[in-house]
Image (cartoon, rainbow, N blue to C red):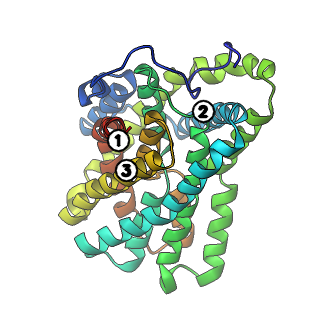
């Protein structure tokens, strides 16, 4: 492989074992997580720290395209036979994880069917920023992982949302028409278009051409992530105020679902032959909850669903939990199994 190829999603080998140095403390002291915590603090103190919506959109669009480009470049360097089984496993997880979330919500909460379905759709999909934070930690710790990891992110983005909408059953909006429009919205929305489009561009572009854009989409990536997490921390901090109103059962579910789904993801990743880093990333993906694609789809197909429930759980509870606890936990589990 060309040594000038970008590193972030390139599988590489460690010279020495890492031991147990991936801890909650090391995660907390990374600039990205510290920026997120600063945003939460700013929100709790009612500071006016908040980027305009246009800046937030630009930052998230950059992250989506950059992840897609790097994943596509890694996919081009991979053998098709190495990718098929992990992709099939990701599709299966995309179906199973919202069903597990639905069962947990039914057991732990008294939410109406439409609200359970809406929350389950969010846990069946994925969080780009949680995935990005996990990639950054693996890079920092020199832990190797598969170059096509972003492909699994793209694969997992859609099935969970579709299953969640189906779980809503007869109460889903204007029946089939509403769900059909929601499916179109998912597939043509900004998240999928930029992520899948970036994968295609990265897979087709020649290495020399890719190297010309690497300074923008690879070199600046960590700094852009810090800015985005700062802004997201403000938004999450504001949502934290809604947690008590959602009830203790929903709060417990928002912690239990990522633990169960993430553990399943690591187990499946290890079973299909992913590296320690790859299995950890699959666990992080299945543990995460969407707050970009899923809210847009749910607002369209399930207008009766209460946004306070699915945004509080996905963004206010599960996202910071995964960022601080989940990521190092799933890395440690993948190492124990690897």
Can residue 306 be seen from the camera position used here? no
Name the side, left or right, on which 245 lies relative to 270: left
Q: Which mark is residue 262?
A: 3
Give the residue at x 53% y 61%: 92
**Quick one: label 3 or label 2, which is nearer the N terminus?**
2
Name the side, left or right, on which 268 lies relative to 42: right
**Quick one: label 1 or label 3, which is nearer the N terminus?**
3
**Residue named by callout 1:** 337
Q: SS at mark 2?
A: loop
Residue 265: image location, x then y, percent: 42, 51
Image: 200 above or below 162 = above
Crowd around label 1: few <14 · some 14–19 · many ≥20 (10 Å) = few
Q: Quadrant of the N terminus?
A: top right
**Quick one: label 1 or label 2, which is nearer the N terminus?**
2
Q: Which mark is residue 86?
A: none
Residue 172: image location, x then y, percent: 52, 79
**Residue named by callout 2:** 147
Q: SS at mark 3?
A: helix
Name the side, left or right, on which 272 lies relative to 206: left
Give the residue at x 51% y 49%: 272
- The residues tagged by marks 1 and 3 sit, at their Cα atoms, a distance apart of 14 Å
Nearer-the-camera pick, 145 or 63: 145
Residue 135: image location, x then y, percent: 47, 31
- The residues tagged by marks 1 and 2 sit, at their Cα atoms, a distance apart of 21 Å
Can residue 45 be seen from the camera position used here? yes
């Amino acid at each position: 492989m060309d040594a000038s190829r970008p590193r972030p999603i390139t599988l590489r080998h460690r010279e020495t074992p890492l031991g147990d140095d991936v801890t909650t403390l090391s995660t907390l002291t990374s600039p990205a997580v510290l920026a997120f915590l600063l945003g939460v603090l700013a929100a709790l103190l009612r500071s006016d720290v908040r980027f305009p919506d246009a800046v937030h959109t630009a930052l998230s669009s950059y992250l989506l395209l950059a992840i897609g480009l790097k994943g596509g470049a890694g996919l081009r360097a991979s053998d098709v036979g190495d990718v098929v089984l992990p992709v099939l496993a990701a599709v299966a997880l995309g179906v199973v994880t919202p069903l597990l979330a639905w069962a947990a919500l039914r057991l732990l909460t008294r939410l109406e069917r439409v609200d359970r379905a809406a929350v389950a759709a969010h846990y069946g999909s994925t969080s780009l920023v949680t995935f990005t934070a996990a990639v950054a930690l693996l890079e920092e710790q020199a832990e190797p992982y598969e170059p096509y990891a972003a492909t699994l992110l793209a694969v997992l983005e859609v099935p969970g949302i579709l299953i969640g909408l189906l779980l809503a059953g007869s109460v889903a909006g204007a029946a089939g028409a509403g769900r059909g429009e929601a499916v179109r919205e998912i597939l043509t929305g900004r998240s999928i278009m930029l992520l899948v489009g970036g994968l295609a561009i990265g897979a087709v572009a020649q290495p020399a051409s890719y190297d010309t854009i690497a300074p923008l989409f690879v070199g600046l990536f960590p700094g852009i992530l810090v800015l985005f997490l700062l802004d997201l921390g403000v938004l999450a901090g504001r949502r934290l105020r809604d947690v008590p109103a959602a009830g203790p059962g929903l709060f417990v579910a928002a912690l239990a679902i990522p633990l169960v789904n993430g553990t399943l993801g690591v187990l499946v990743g290890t079973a299909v032959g992913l590296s320690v880093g790859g299995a950890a990333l699959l666990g992080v993906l299945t543990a995460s909850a969407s707050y970009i694609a899923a809210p847009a789809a749910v607002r369209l197909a399930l207008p009766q669903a209460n946004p306070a429930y699915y945004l509080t759980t996905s963004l206010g509870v599960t996202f910071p939990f995964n960022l601080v606890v989940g990521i190092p936990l799933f890395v440690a589990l993948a190492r124990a199994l690897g």
